[in-house]
Amino acid sequence: MEKALKHKFLVGETVLFTASNVARPAASGTYEVIRLLPTDGDDFQYRIKNSAEAFERVAKESQLASC
């Protein structure tokens, strides 16, 4: 029986974001999960927001860790 894949983090959860060296420069740090997004084929994605920024970011699950 195949196990259903689920997001590791929940909306409202605080997570640590580590920016990729390959992607645009981004501020690593503490973010709040705003929305769960579908997988990009390899990894679930999330919309996250840092309280010090006026915008949201999209991050892969592999870039996030529990606080």
Image: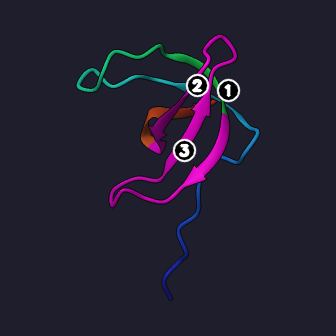
Residue 40 position by quadrant = bottom left
Q: Which is closer to the viewer, label 2 or label 3? A: 3
Q: Which of marks 3 and 1 is nearer the N terminus?
A: 3
Marks 1 and 2 sit apart, C-alpha to C-alpha, by 6 Å
Left or right of residue 54: residue 60: left
* Three-letter amino acid code at the position of disc 1: Cys
- Is-magenta flag for residue 54? yes
Q: Which mark is residue 16?
A: 2
Q: CB under 8 Å between callouts 3 and 1?
A: no
For residue 63, above or below residue 44 = above
Q: Earlier in the sequence, mark 1 or mark 2?
A: 2
Q: Label 1's element?
A: loop
Kindly identify which residue carries mark 3.
46
Whether residue 64 is visible: yes
* Three-letter amino acid code at the position of disc 2: Leu
Kindly identify which residue carries mark 1.
67
Q: Label 3's element?
A: strand
Marks 2 and 3 sit apart, C-alpha to C-alpha, by 12 Å
Q: Which residue lies furthest to the left in this view?
A: 22
Q: Label 2's element?
A: strand
Q: Residue at x 54, y 44 (%)?
A: 46
Can you give x and y, in whole percent of width and height, for residue 57 in the image? 50, 31
Span colored in magenta: 33-61
